[in-house]
Image (spheres, helix red, strand yellow):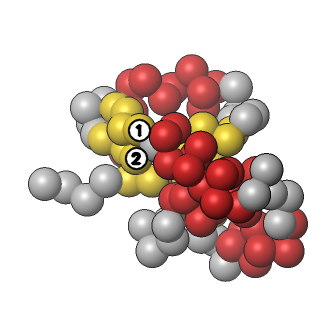
Amino acid sequence: MTNQDLRSQLDENLDEAEWEWLIPHVQRDSVIVVATELDLLDVGEAIASDKAKEVQNWIDEALIAKPSAAQMGEWNMQKEKRFNTLIVQPFVLVQEKAAA
């Protein structure tokens, strides 16, 4: 599969979800929070293409991470909070949507 095919396939999987819908995925430890300065598709593509070095750099810079207890506590108080989401098996990449 070419990068372009992969990117368009991922693009079709881009979605939006409320925090409440993401909780079961968090409990399975499959949610990865992506910093707003990164492009969700770029991150999804890097993970799907096994670009370990790029992904490790983002982890080292804390631009992608598992949700922290503090974040989850905050989001639990605002269950209607919205996220951009992208499923890249077995992970669910989430990015906070800016408040409207």
Q: Residues within 10 Å of mark 2 (few under 14, many from 20)?
A: some
Residue at coordinates 83% horizontally, 66% vertically from top-left?
Answer: 51
The quadrant in which residue 83 appears is: top left
80 relative to 10, above or below: above
Left/right of residue 54 with respect to residue 66 in the rendered view: right
Q: Which of the labelled discs sits on residue 68, or is there none?
A: none
Q: Residue furthest left?
A: 100
Q: Residue at x 60, y 38 (%)?
A: 87
Q: Which residue is mark 1?
A: 15
Residue drawn at x 31%, y 53% is 97
Say if residue 77 shows up in the picture: no
Q: Is residue 32 left or right of residue 16?
A: right
x and y percent of residue 69 in the render? Answer: 55, 45
Above or below, 21 against 52 in this view is: above
Whole-percent x and y of residue 17?
A: 37, 33
Which residue is more in the foreground, 18 or 6? 6
Residue at disc 2, secondary structure: strand
In the shown orientation, is residue 47 left or right of residue 33?
Answer: right
Label 2, label 1: how far apart the Cα atoms are: 6 Å
Q: Are marks 2 and 1 in contact (CB under 8 Å)?
A: yes
| Amino acid on which the number 1 mark rests in the picture | Asp
Front residue (pair 77, 45): 45
Rendered view: 73 above or below 1? above
Q: In which quadrant is the C terminus drawn?
A: bottom left
User: What percent of the width, then of the height, locates residue 34?
Assistant: 54, 59
Q: Secondary structure at mark 1?
A: strand
Can residue 83 be seen at all in this image of the molecule?
Answer: yes
Q: Residue at x 30, y 41 (%)?
A: 82
Task: Write down the residue under mark 2.
Answer: 84
Q: Is 78 rendered above or below residue 52? A: above
